Image (cartoon, rainbow, N blue to C red):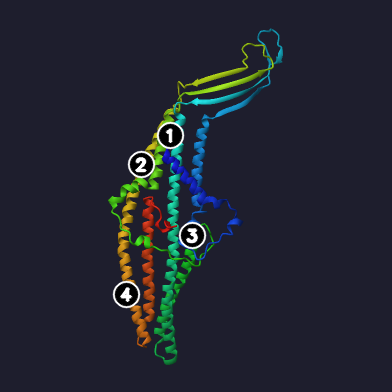
Amino acid sequence: MMATGRMSILCVALSSLLFSPLVLGDEERSHLPLPEPLTLSDALLIGTQSYPELAVAQNQIAAAEISLGKVDASYGVNAFVELQPRLSSRAATDAVDFQDDSRYGLVIRKRLTDFGRTKSRKEAAQSDIAASQARFVTRLDRHRLEIIRSFFAVILADHAYRARNERLAIAYFRYSRMAERRDRFEQFSDLEVAKQEAAYRKVYVARHRADLERRQRRHALALKLGRPGELSSDLVVPDLSAYRDREVPEYNDIIDEAIATSSILKAHRANVASAQAKVSIAQKLNSPVLSADFEAREYHDSSFSSRDRYRLNFKFIMPLLDGTHVRDTEVALAENALAQKQAELLMAEYGVRQDALSLISDLLVNRAAIVAAEADENYRSYYQDRSRAMYEMEMRSDLGDAQAAAAEAMLEAARVDFEQALLWTELDALLARPLALTEDD
């Protein structure tokens, strides 16, 4: 119960932090533009304030809490006024003589116990809240990962555009120089010039596609931030040093922690607990109910001794026969639902095991890819320096190709660095650990 209370407090805090801007009108939100340049920390903060999928998850928590309140209210006190304007003819007289026999009163009722059925309903409702809270955490982790992925995709698209631009400059220079020499000196044939132009046009298409990709990636990021149409022109490359010195863990060292802390499995365990409570509810469908009534009445004709001004009643209702077999049907359905939830929990556990193994394998491959990318980038840097030196000495040089290759090496180095950060972020979420990119914040 203490853990459930802490979880509720956490979700209330998250609700106030993440969704307070949802109550703002469109006019107010229009005065909060995206910062320029945009940092990853800003993107994560903005993206978790107004994203509709997170609002849906928060509303599901609220709905589960409302259902719990409804269960608690079943033991509340009901009070109502009862008015009975009536005419009656007494049986003691032979003649039909209608007289005013009106009455009114105040009735107060309270259920005292239903012998455990409401307790089971409350357990089911509390488990539903826990499941909704865990699903919210899962969606939050997933959305933050999508924001990071979209943020990195914009930066990579910019790198790719620069690399394509280098290739385009080289292709255009070669085509224009060949066409000029053909026209002035007839050094090249029309066939050779046409071939070079075709190569240039293909590179131009690739550069044009890369340019459009930059815009598409910015649109995708804007949607993940809940700011459609607000395209960030300048993004700050985040500091990823927190991940570079990490040791990749062994599968056996983390799998128990993953199974114990995964928000995905917490949601499924809560679903199983709710289903178990609902089996108990169904089993107690015909359980007895003890309630108390207090009545205070006034009569137009109070001459009868049986007419009590005040009355306190205790009512014990116990079903004896269920000819429609409603209870048996409800129990069977609840047990079937429980078996399904237990199977879903086991399937989810298998999925977590597979995800953990895949992430560790990908991190090991990524570590080797980072070393390879750094080696290639170092080689391209040396090669570019040599080509520049040869160019400055007016020797035959492939400086343009060297610059393009260096830009492509930088693109690959950035890609594997970003891939490493994404893999660690996903593993941290699986283990319910804080996001390293924002720990200092």
Quadrant in the picture for residue 29: bottom right
Question: Picture coordinates of residue 399 (x, y %)?
Answer: 37, 81
Label 3–label 4 contact, CB within 8 A: no
Amino acid type, residue under disc 2 in the picture: Ala
Q: Residue at x 42, y 92 (%)?
A: 185
Q: Earlier in the sequence, mark 1 or mark 3?
A: 3
Question: Picture coordinates of residue 426 (x, y %)?
Answer: 38, 55
Determine the CA span between mark 3 and mark 4: 36 Å
Task: Name the mark on residue 278.
Answer: 1
Residue neighbourhood size for the residue with mark 1, other residues' Cα within 10 Å, grouped as few (<14), some (14–19), many (≥20): many
Q: Which residue is mark 3?
A: 42
Which structural element holds mark 3? helix
Task: Name the mark on residue 286.
Answer: none
Q: Which residue is mark 4?
A: 379
Using the rendered image of the protein, determine whether residue 333 is visible from the camera's viewpoint.
Answer: no
Quadrant in the picture for residue 367: bottom left
- Viewer-nearest of labels 1 and 3? 3
Which structural element holds mark 2? helix
The relative height of residue 164 versus residue 77 in the rendered view (above or below) is: below
In the rendered image, the quadrant that contains the N terminus is top left
Q: Residue at x 39, y 44 (%)?
A: 266
Q: Earlier in the sequence, mark 3 or mark 4?
A: 3
Determine the CA span between mark 2 and mark 4: 54 Å
Label 1–label 2 contact, CB within 8 A: no
Amino acid type, residue under disc 4 in the picture: Tyr
Residue neighbourhood size for the residue with mark 3, other residues' Cα within 10 Å, grouped as few (<14), some (14–19), many (≥20): few
Q: Residue at x 50, y 40 (%)?
A: 65
Question: Picture coordinates of residue 5 (x, y %)?
Answer: 45, 40
Determine the CA span between mark 3 and mark 2: 40 Å
Q: Which residue is mark 2?
A: 343
Which structural element holds mark 1? helix
